[in-house]
Image (cartoon, rainbow, N blue to C red):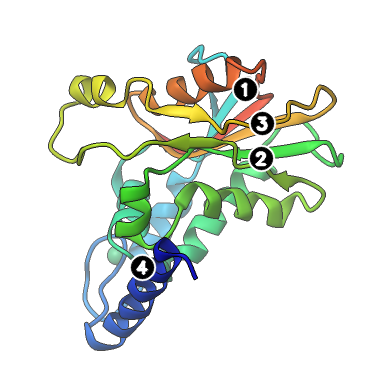
Amino acid sequence: MGKEHKDNFIIRYFKQLLLLLVPLNCGGCGKNDVVFCQNCQEDLAKQIHPQYINKEYKLGKVITGGKYEGVLRQVILNWKDHGRDDLDYLIDKIINKILCNLDISYNSSNILIIPAPSSRISKTKRGKDQGVILGKKILNNIKSAHLYPILIQKSIKKQVNYSGLERQINKRDKIRIKTITKVYKNKKYILVDDIITTGATIRECQKALSSVGIVPDLTIALAST
Ligand SMILES: [Zn+2]
């Protein structure tokens, strides 16, 4: 077992243990003793509203699950940053809804799913690679597709305290393509990321992908601002 894998395993193990010890609270509003309360379920159902967004990222059509605010934002944050793996089923719901709203058919076997990369630091801290997890969730719905994790991100400084602009600068040129990457001319590529806020991350992805001539047909994110 590699060190990173071992670390991930230990983090996951303790997270499971913590879930048994710490009283539950709602992944939306924080209310006690419930994983996800009735009110939040209703709010989330209203808020998941997949839409193509109009920004020009040169990443094909860009679709997101809804506005990154309210309960949708809270669920994604808790799932992604606060170790709430028990909210996984809600992330599945968002992904399913997005895929149901695609206006293109993706039933061929020509699809490669490219996850936006996480830094090694965040992978270790969170005990999981969210891009890959999201990619796999899409695979569950498009069975004939394949995961193609060719983007990597060098470890960068902690970003929580940076403003949007500083974060953009901090990320500059940190995402790149794995050295030996095969580019398939007859495949469709789907890029997947968790959220689109400043667009800095997916712009970095676009730059890296275009350096080897890959232009995704579609980009999927759980939510966008
Ligand atoms: Zn709630």
Horizontal side of residue 31 vs 56, given as left or right = left
Q: For the point 85% across and 25% down, which residue is it?
A: 186
Q: Which residue is mark 2?
A: 113
Which amino acid does the dot numbered 4 rest on?
Asp
User: Within 10 angstroms of label 1, few (less than 14), some, or many (20 or more) residues?
Assistant: some
Q: How many marks?
A: 4
Q: Marks 2/4: CA distance?
A: 26 Å
Identify which amino acid the numbered label 3 is placed on.
Thr
Amino acid type, callout 2: Ile
Q: Helix or strand or loop: what does disc 4 sit on?
A: helix
Of tags 2 and 3, which is closer to the observer? 3
Residue at the (66%, 41%) spot, across then down: 148
Ligand 1 within 8 A of label 1's CB?
A: no
Q: Secondary structure at mark 2?
A: strand
In the rendered structure, find residue 61 and report the number of the disc placed on it: 1
Question: Label 3 vs label 1: CA separation?
Answer: 23 Å
Is label 1 in a helix, a strand or a loop? strand
Q: Earlier in the sequence, mark 3 or mark 1?
A: 1
